[in-house]
């Protein structure tokens, strides 16, 4: 069996503070070419206790060693469900580092930054075409902030119509950010159980005149298209509510179906998922939001408009929900996403969605039977197995940790919450059949190990930088910073 | 397409394994009335060279601070970025990794964040810092929400008018529907008016929020404000949009702040038209469990070896859902790394020296402008690397006149501060040479730049 496991030298490395040597420097500061003056001594601080003192070489080795303890998309398959860990094209990084993009100040007069504004305008237009929404804001810093912006617009719309609604309906398969973002807008969350696909009846049972919105994820976190979505949207609209769609799983839908065409009123994009911008070890993300016509007056400020004399930032929106953050969004991330759209074209994006779905279904076909598949409906870009049937008290966590020993990043585990011991696999379109075959061979081997040598799963990982870490102790006695012992 | 590895043979074999005859069948779960019946109108794919040529064309239309004499600050600062930073953050083991939910293969990210948390604590004088927020403005808004959650029934927030306008606007957005009263504290001579502050304080005030330095570059008397604030039982939030100042001035922690938030862009992150930057968020130990955002903690593995994990996650949305301390999910991972590398390179001595250079350059510019006819320095107090001047010439015309000479003179204050319609906020950093400053002064005076 092929695998990506191997043997290597893993170097240890202390903390910056433990490496520090008094008097060592890693900087060169421009010569002072004006008279030296110092502020009022009463305002001045003492030296920063225990701040590191390192040479440039120390710092370079430190972070280079740290990097070798990480696993990224460039290391291998990273099949995290609902995270869309596709390849991050290198041209995106080159484009985002062009000096004309990195070296521009947000307060420069608009007439002097027409290229940046044109890029943002084009991206607004392209995201609108992909999603079917007439207007897009690029300002939200990440998906969760996009949700917050979207729900604020929904609340503003209701209030502009003289309505005070208090509730938001959210299926139990939703990401935790959905209820958290709703709560930030002052809404009470009504959770509905969904048996795979959300039924019109389930929504009708909780829909009333006090419901401001329904939040759905489509395709949902089980990888299933919400087949009743049009009827559900009609139902919510008839009772005066709006429908929010979490765009986390848009990677299955490009060129296939547009949320704006089927009754969705507002949706956020995750540029770091669908549009190939890097996850960065946790961020920065970028969470643009598309809205239907009726929500346009409430968009956050500023957004980019095109006028006869060029592009400008629009601030004059009296009904706007306001500003989500400083300046104009995560511009550096917007450049990467736009670069990706240019590189793929409309046909390429559709092909990406098709192959993402093909890859997930291939994994499903290869593993079904050996791993329990609780939901048999035709799934799209991701597939969710349960831990039912794993032998010898082996659990999803053990399978995940054993995958590490074989050289793979584990899938998303224990989410969605509705699947017992969920193992949620999203391969994305950038993985080849050969990679998927190797991965499936390994997962099948692990299922066999669970039967014959379960200790291999229980002890795993044994080949990573560290063995299983005591997370309980970390939470019980939090040590959140280094201090001199 | 070069990112899509499938050959026709691969696709056919995969379809055979799935037991469908074509890819279209895989989409049978998407009803016909939900399907897009035409191709996306996005144009054809561009080649790598065409893409770069096109984007370079857009980039070249922009105004680079390095080509101009730029004195723009106001929450985004033009500091030199050592070459080491981009080289190291370009290691794709860092930037193509996800959130470190699988700690055994994410120790690089986790240790780097643990070190970042420590560096932020040391710099701010606080006990606990999180793994970062989106930016300074949203971190400040989250700080306000923390004080409301922790402040029992207190529902008023006092915001100094010296807070950056974009911070105040973001706070207004975040608190719009949570029954929070936002009340402005007026300024006196460019700093928070403590007499007015004293009048506004009551047992209903959850927090007082002060810029340090404030939007005008002024160093607020944080110690005295802390005493007033604590006497009424409220928390003091210090918001730092230029954290380089903390290498020179007493830390907010030392002066009594309960929460220190701010923007870390100054530390090695490109301006990038205002984003991404990074918010930092630090508190005292007693507020550790009501913090928003991710936290990394130290622990041990089965063999007793030191390692790091995400911890105290029961505060967060993926566990606590609508009862979470915040809806935030991501942190600014890649920017965390930039800031940590920048601080590690500069270290104890370098950061102080750099702050002193910024101070001296701004002081030189301020003194030169003070001597010009038709201009005055607006406020007499201590400033760091920014200050406000008042111009007898209308500011819009003045700025345009200077733009024609390649000078970005500063930020007009009239829109956000009607009382300062003649005001111009000028920022001077180590990137501005004496010759540049002299050109600015000459241009202001009406001569050739």
Image: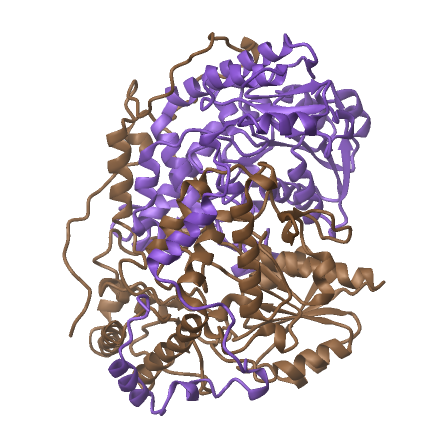
Chain colours: A brown, B purple
The answer to whether residue A440 of the structure is visible from this angle is yes
Look at the picture and state if B319 lies above or below B231: below
In the image, B320: left or right of B307?
right
Look at the picture and state if B166 lies above or below B17: above
Residue B361 point in image, percent of width and height:
50, 16
The answer to whether residue A389 of the structure is visible from this angle is no
* Quadrant position of the N terminus of chain B in the picture: bottom left
What residue lies at 57% left-to-right and 60% top-to-bottom? A177
Look at the picture and state if B129 lies above or below A299: above
Between B447 and B118, which is closer to the camera in this rendering? Answer: B447
* Quadrant position of the C terminus of chain B in the picture: top right
Between B235 and A293, which is closer to the camera in this rendering? Answer: A293
What residue lies at 47% left-to-right and 16% top-to-bottom? B435
Residue B146 point in image, percent of width and height:
63, 44
Residue B386 point in image, percent of width and height:
58, 22
Location of residue B343 by image quarter: top left
Residue A325 point in image, percent of width and height:
61, 45
In the image, A207: left or right of B78?
right
Location of residue A358 by image quarter: bottom left
What residue lies at 49% left-to-right and 43% top-to-bottom? B61
In the image, B343: left or right of A219?
left
Look at the picture and state if A470 lies above or below A110: below
How many discs mark residues in the rendered view?
0
Between A476 and B75, which is closer to the camera in this rendering? Answer: B75
Location of residue B397 by image quarter: top right
């Amino acid at each position: 069996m092929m695998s990506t496991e191997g043997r290597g030298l893993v170097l240890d490395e202390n903390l910056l503070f433990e490496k520090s040597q008094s008097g060592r420097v890693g900087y060169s500061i421009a010569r002072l070419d004006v008279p030296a003056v110092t502020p009022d001594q009463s305002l001045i601080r003492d030296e920063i206790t225990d701040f590191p003192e390192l040479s440039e070489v120390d710092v370079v080795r430190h972070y280079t060693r740290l990097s070798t303890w990480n696993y990224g998309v460039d290391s291998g398959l990273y099949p995290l469900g609902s995270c869309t860990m596709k390849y991050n094209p290198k041209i995106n990084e080159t484009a985002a580092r062009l000096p004309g993009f990195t070296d521009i100040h947000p307060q420069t007069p608009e007439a002097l930054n027409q290229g940046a504004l044109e890029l943002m305008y084009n991206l607004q237009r392209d995201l609108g075409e992909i999603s079917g929404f007439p207007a897009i804001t690029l300002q939200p810093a990440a998906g969760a902030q996009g949700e917050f912006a979207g729900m604020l617009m929904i609340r503003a719309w209701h209030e502009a119509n003289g309505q005070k609604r208090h509730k938001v309906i959210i299926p139990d398969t939703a990401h935790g950010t959905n209820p958290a973002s709703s709560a930030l807008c002052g809404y009470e969350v009504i959770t509905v159980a969904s048996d795979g696909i959300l039924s019109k009846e389930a929504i009708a049972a909780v829909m009333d005149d006090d419901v401001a919105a329904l939040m759905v994820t489509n395709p949902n976190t089980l990888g299933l298209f919400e087949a009743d979505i049009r009827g559900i949207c009609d139902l919510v609209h008839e009772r005066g509510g709006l429908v929010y769609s979490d765009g986390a799983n848009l990677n299955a839908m490009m060129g296939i179906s547009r949320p704006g065409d089927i009754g969705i009123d507002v949706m956020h994009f995750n540029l770091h998922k669908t549009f190939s911008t890097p996850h960065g070890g946790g961020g920065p993300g970028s969470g643009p939001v598309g809205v239907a016509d009726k929500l346009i007056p409430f968009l956050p400020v500023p957004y980019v408009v095109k006028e006869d004399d060029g592009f400008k930032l629009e601030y004059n929106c009296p009904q706007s929900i306001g500003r989500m953050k400083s300046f104009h969004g995560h511009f550096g991330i917007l450049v990467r996403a736009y670069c990706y759209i240019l590189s793929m074209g409309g046909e390429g994006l559709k092909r990406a969605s098709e192959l993402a779905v093909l890859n997930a279904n291939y994994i499903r076909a290869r593993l079904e039977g050996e791993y329990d598949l609780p939901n048999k409906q035709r799934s799209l870009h991701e597939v969710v197995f349960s831990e039912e049937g794993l032998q010898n008290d082996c659990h999803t966590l053990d399978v995940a940790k054993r995958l590490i020993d074989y050289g793979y990043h584990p899938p998303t585990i224990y989410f969605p919450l509705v699947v017992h011991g969920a193992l949620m696999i999203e391969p994305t379109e950038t993985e080849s059949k050969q990679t998927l075959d190797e991965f499936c061979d390994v997962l099948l081997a692990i299922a066999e190990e669970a039967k014959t040598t379960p200790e291999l799963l229980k002890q795993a990982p044994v080949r990573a930088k560290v063995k299983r870490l005591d997370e309980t102790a970390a939470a019980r006695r939090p040590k959140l910073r280094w201090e001199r012992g | 397409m070069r990112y899509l590895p499938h050959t026709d043979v691969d696709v056919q074999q995969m379809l055979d394994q799935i037991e469908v005859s074509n890819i279209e069948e895989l989409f049978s779960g998407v009803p016909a009335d939900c399907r897009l019946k035409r191709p996306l109108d996005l144009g054809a794919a561009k080649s790598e060279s065409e893409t770069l040529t096109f984007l370079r064309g857009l980039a070249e239309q922009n105004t680079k601070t390095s080509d101009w004499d730029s004195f723009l600050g106001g929450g985004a600062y033009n500091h030199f970025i050592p070459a080491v930073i981009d080289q190291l953050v370009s290691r794709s083991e860092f930037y193509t990794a996800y959130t470190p939910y699988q700690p055994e293969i994410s120790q690089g990210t986790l240790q780097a964040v643990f070190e970042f948390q420590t560096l932020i604590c040391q710099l701010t004088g606080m006990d606990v810092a999180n793994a970062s927020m989106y930016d300074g403005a949203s971190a400040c808004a989250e700080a306000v929400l923390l004080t409301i959650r922790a402040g029992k029934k207190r529902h008023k927030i006092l915001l100094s008018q010296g807070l950056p306008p974009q911070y105040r606007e973001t706070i207004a957005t975040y608190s719009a529907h949570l029954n929070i009263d936002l009340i402005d504290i007026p300024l006196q001579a460019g700093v928070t008016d403590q007499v007015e502050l004293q009048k506004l304080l009551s047992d209903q005030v959850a927090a007082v929020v002060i810029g340090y330095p404030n939007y005008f570059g002024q160093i607020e008397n944080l110690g005295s404000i802390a005493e007033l604030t604590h006497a009424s039982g409220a928390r003091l939030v210090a918001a730092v949009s230029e954290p380089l100042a903390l290498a020179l001035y007493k830390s907010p922690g030392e002066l009594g702040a309960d929460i220190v938030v701010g923007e870390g862009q100054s530390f090695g992150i490109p301006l990038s038209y205002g984003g991404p930057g990074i918010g930092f968020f630090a508190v005292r130990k007693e507020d550790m469990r009501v913090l928003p955002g991710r936290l990394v903690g130290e622990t041990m593995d089965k063999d007793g070896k030191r390692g790091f994990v995400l911890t105290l996650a029961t505060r967060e949305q993926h566990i606590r859902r609508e009862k979470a301390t915040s809806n935030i999910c991501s942190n600014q991972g890649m920017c965390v790394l930039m800031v940590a590398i920048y601080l590690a390179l500069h270290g104890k001595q370098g950061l102080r020296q750099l702050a002193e250079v910024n101070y001296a350059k701004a002081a030189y510019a301020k003194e030169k402008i003070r001597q010009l006819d038709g201009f005055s320095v607006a406020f007499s107090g201590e400033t760091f690397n920014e200050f406000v001047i008042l111009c007898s010439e209308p500011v819009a015309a003045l700025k345009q006149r200077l733009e024609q000479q390649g000078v970005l003179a500063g930020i007009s204050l009239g829109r956000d501060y009607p009382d300062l319609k003649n005001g111009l906020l000028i920022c001077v950093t180590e990137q501005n040479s004496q010759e540049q400053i002299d050109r600015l002064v000459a241009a202001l005076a009406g001569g050739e730049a």
